[in-house]
Amino acid sequence: MAIQGILVVLSGPSGAGKGTICQELLRSYPELNYSISATTRAPRTGEQNGVNYWFISDAEFQTMINNDQLLEWAEVYGNFYGTPCHHVATLLNSGKDIVLEIDAQGATQIKKKFPQGVCIYIAPPSLDELAKRIHKRGTDSLESIKTRLSSASGELTYVYNYDYIVVNDEVQSATKKIAAIITAEKCQVVRNVTTIEGILSNFYK
Amino acid sequence: MAIQGILVVLSGPSGAGKGTICQELLRSYPELNYSISATTRAPRTGEQNGVNYWFISDAEFQTMINNDQLLEWAEVYGNFYGTPCHHVATLLNSGKDIVLEIDAQGATQIKKKFPQGVCIYIAPPSLDELAKRIHKRGTDSLESIKTRLSSASGELTYVYNYDYIVVNDEVQSATKKIAAIITAEKCQVVRNVTTIEGILSNFYK
């Protein structure tokens, strides 16, 4: 049996830069696998079904909730987002590592359902910087920007539910820290019981 | 007040290569500080007092034990080894990270006295490889080699007291893993409460 892969959860408030970091992580470490979330929100320009998200209807999403087919799900600004269990379980059991980019609500659910998941909180360096980034993205209305900034304050208090915090003052540096966290987690004694028992049996045979 | 530094404990059986890895780590990451142990054993060729060890007498060592001036100490093959508290505390409080290379007995003491210490077990890939390395070193008598191999089996069972295991099949690769562990530990939420409170107060002011 392959050693179980690691589920890495990247989360944090909107505008902290978790999307950019996730892309950079997948580019730099192609052995990582991206978990595609399901969502009921409309695709943004350039987003593709089965690549960025599984774009599904409200009814389909509700069926997945009812059948307990989601590792986590959340309603964010009136839309539903969730992680289908099946895809995640298949990859982890075959020893593959997965990166999951979700909003702050979902990470707490993951930590409860799957405590061996590695939850990393991506924090913006400051409120000013967060406001600048959301403006710069230009995909949100003024009302939406205000809602995001206000909820960001609330979401930051979730940080104590996470294992790690990485302040995203620079994408390359933040990405390297996350890669280091994955390497370190793979060295944890509790994740290497099979390897350790192998070494011990070699010594005592 | 500076954020507390991290105490990294490299340990494992004799011949696993912890000395070589420690040297490589200090060469590659000069911001790390080496904690010099005190010992009652005679210096090996080329070893210097205050560089490799503090070479002290049995009486001096006993005084340090009695005055609780050692973070850990152990008797190994008839000699005493220990870590003076004072040097470690001064460096950690000024935000500096320390690497400590000790035998398996000491790591368990450290973990009890100083649970925030990061204990890394350096494991040899196999018993055969361990035997080869001890022979190659050529500083031990045949009797001493036999004692070391026999005790290595016993010491390996200590691995479950450690936080991390790094199998030393290649020095460069093992050193990089240890560097990643240090980076990851510095990102742990529990080690960043001061930073987090700073970000939160910035959001709520």
Image (spheres, coloured by chain):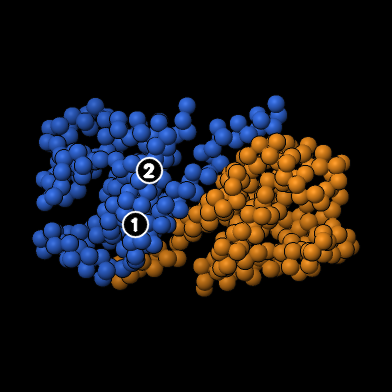
Chain colours: A blue, B orange
Q: Residue at x 30, y 33 (%)?
A: A87
- For this rendering, which residue is in front, A74 or B181? B181
Residue under the image location 47 percent in, 33 percent down: A3
Q: Amino acid at mark 1?
A: Ile
Q: Which residue is mark 2?
A: A31
Q: Quadrant of residue A146?
A: bottom left
Is residue B63 in view?
no
Answer left or right for A130 relative to B44: left
Q: Quadrant of the C terminus of chain B?
A: bottom left
Residue type at mark 2: give it.
Glu
How far across and how far down the image is residue A157, in percent?
A: 34, 57
Mark 2 lies on a secondary structure that is loop
The residue carrying pointer 2 sits among few (fewer than 14), some (14 to 19) or many (20 or more) residues within 10 Å by Cα, namely few
CA distance separating discs 1 and 2: 22 Å
Q: In the displayed structure, does residue B71 sit left or right of residue B172? A: right
First in sequence: mark 1 vs mark 2: 2
Q: Are marks 1 and 2 in contact (CB under 8 Å)?
A: no
Where does the image place residue A160, in percent across and percent down from the top left? Answer: 40, 54
Quarter of image, res A193: top right
Q: Nearer the viewer, residue B102 or A153?
A: B102
Residue B9 position within the rendered picture, expressed as x and y whole percent measured from the top left: 63, 54
Helix, strand or loop at disc 1? strand
Image check: B11 left or right of A184?
Answer: right
Chain ID for label 1? A
What residue appears at the point 68 percent right and 39 percent down from the top-left corner? B129
Quarter occupied by residue A145: bottom left
| Chain name for mark 2 | A
Q: Which residue is mark 1?
A: A122
Eyeballing the image, is A84 above or below B174? Answer: above
Residue pictured at 73% horizontal, 37% vertical? B154
Asked if labels 1 and 2 share a chain, the reply is yes
Question: Residue B101 at what x, y percent from top left?
Answer: 68, 56
